[in-house]
Image (spheres, grey):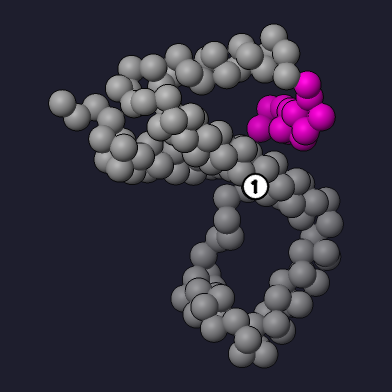
Amino acid sequence: MAHPWSLTSLNDAQFGPNGMRHFEQSLAAVAGTGLGVAARFELIAVVDSYVSGNVLHAVESLARGRAAEADPAMVAAAVAYGVAQLGTGEFPQLSAIYAEAAEAAGPPMTEDALTEQFERGLAALLDGLAGRMNIGKA
C-alpha cells in the first residue's frame, strides 16, 4: 500500500536482476515446504495473486475514503443511488445485507483496518494451502 504504483509498473518490466531477486526471495520463502518445483511455483503464484489483488482493493478503498471525506455530497448521492437500486428487487443478497446492517459502518477505509484484514486473509489462505498441499506434515 505504501507503493501503489509498484504493481502496475511491473506490467512492462523486463526480466532482469531485480525480477530474479524477487523470485529468489519467493523461492527461499517456500524452500522448506518439502514441495516439488511445480507445487512451489503454484504456492508462490497463489500468494502473489492474493497479495496483488488485496493491494489493488486496499488502494481503491483508501482512495474512496479520501474522496468521501473531500466530497460528502457525492457520498450522499451515491448512497441514495444505491438504495434506489436495492429497491428494484434485482439485488436480493445486497438488500438483505443492507437491511441487516443498516446501522453498521461500511467497509474499513483506514490503512490499519485494511492491513489487519489483509493479515487475517493471508493467514487463512496459508492455513488452507498448508492443509491442501500437506505442508509441514511428517
Q: Residue at x 70, y 82 (%)?
A: 85
Q: Residue at x 64, y 83 (%)?
A: 86
Q: Is residue 29 placed above or below 126 in the rendered structure?
A: above
Residue in front for this viewpoint, 47 or 17: 17
Q: Is residue 97 placed above or below 13 in the rendered structure?
A: below
Residue in front for this viewpoint, 122 or 25: 25
Q: Label 1: state its secondary structure.
A: helix
Q: Is residue 17 placed above or below 95 in the rendered structure?
A: above
Quadrant for the C terminus in the image: top left
Q: Position of residue 68 (x, y in %)?
A: 76, 55
Tell me the residue that label 1 is attached to: 57
In this rendering, position of residue 135 left or right of residue 87: left
Q: Position of residue 114 (x, y in %)?
A: 56, 42
Residue in front for this viewpoint, 75 or 19: 19
Find out whether residue 25 is within the magenta segment: no
Whether residue 99 is visible here, answered yes or no, is no
Residue in front for this viewpoint, 61 or 25: 25
Q: Position of residue 57 (x, y in %)?
A: 65, 47
Quadrant for the N terminus in the image: top right
Q: Residue at x 77, y 70 (%)?
A: 78
Q: Which residue is at the far bottom?
A: 88
Find out whether residue 7 is within the magenta segment: yes
- The residue stretch that appears in magenta: 1-14
In this rendering, position of residue 94 left or right of residue 134: right
Amino acid under label 1?
Answer: His
In which image quadrant can residue 9 be found? top right
Q: Residue at x 51, y 20 (%)?
A: 26
Mark 1 neighbour class, 10 Å CA radius: few under 14, some 14 to 19, many 20 or more:
few
Q: Position of residue 121 (x, y in %)?
A: 44, 43
Q: Which residue is at the far top?
A: 17
